[in-house]
Image (cartoon, rainbow, N blue to C red):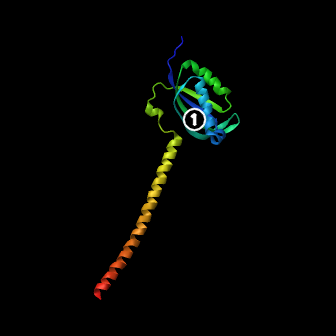
């Protein structure tokens, strides 16, 4: 029984880190080619993280994970898995049916995005602390110069 109802899937693609670092568009292009051959509608596609692999896969010891959410006909998954196996750019892929995922879940920050956000917040807090410390150091100096001006005015009045 053929069905043309597209379902929502999560796809985790593993690509060679050297390829992703050298040419990010080529890595994304490899994933998009596999999805387009299966006539999938991409909902979300983003870099998840780069990690050291537990064991070498196809001679690679590091990999970059690309997280995708896409809508696809269930009958197109097997050909898509075959395309992944034949692809030289993609090391591995895993597909999960995720019909009950909300948009909030799909747009959730990846570990990489979360780390970048935390790093930016820490940098901003550090800069604010430095600015505050600089302002506190300049304040007593300004008070000291005002004090000498007050003393000079008092001395002028006394004469």
Q: Is residue 112 left or right of residue 137?
A: right
Residue occupying image coordinates x 56% and y 38%: 47
Element at label 1: strand
Q: Residue at x 48, y 47 (%)?
A: 118
Residue occupying the far bottom of the picture: 159
Residue 1, above or below 130: above
Q: Quadrant of the N terminus?
A: top right
Q: Residue furthest left?
A: 157
Looking at the rendered structure, the number of numbered marks drawn on it comes to: 1
Quadrant housing residue 81: top right
Residue under circle 1? 66
Q: Residue 57 or 67: which is nearer the viewer? A: 67
Label 1 Cα crowd, 10 Å radius (few <14 / some 14-19 / many 20+):
many
Picture quadrant of residue 152: bottom left
- Quarter the C terminus occupies: bottom left
Seen in the image, is 123 located left or right of residue 17? left
Q: Position of residue 108 (x, y in %)?
A: 47, 36
Give coordinates of residue 22: x percent, y percent.
65, 42
Residue that protrudes farthest toward the top in the picture: 1
Going by the image, does 6 lie left or right of 21?
A: left
| In front of the other: 34 or 14 | 34
Coordinates of residue 116 in the picture (x, y in percent): 51, 46
Q: 124 or 148, which lies in front? A: 148
User: Which residue is depicted at the point 54% across and 31% down?
Assistant: 68
Nearest the camera: 84 or 94?
84
Q: Residue at x 64, y 23 (%)?
A: 82
């Amino acid at each position: 029984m053929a069905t043309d109802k597209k379902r929502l899937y999560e796809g985790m693609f593993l690509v060679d880190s050297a390829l992703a670092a050298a040419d990010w568009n080529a890595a994304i292009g490899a994933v998009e080619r596999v999805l387009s051959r299966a006539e999938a509608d991409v909902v979300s596609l983003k870099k998840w993280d780069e990690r050291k692999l537990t064991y070498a896969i196809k001679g690679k010891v590091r990999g970059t994970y690309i997280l995708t959410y896409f809508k696809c006909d269930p009958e197109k998954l097997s050909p898509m898995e075959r395309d992944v196996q034949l692809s030289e750019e993609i090391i591995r892929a895993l597909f999960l049916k995720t019909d009950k995922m909300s948009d909030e879940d799909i747009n959730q920050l990846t570990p990489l995005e979360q780390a970048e956000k935390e790093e930016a917040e820490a940098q901003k807090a550090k800069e604010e602390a430095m600015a505050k410390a600089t302002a506190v150091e300049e304040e007593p100096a300004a008070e000291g110069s005002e004090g000498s001006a007050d003393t000079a005015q008092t001395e002028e009045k006394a004469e």
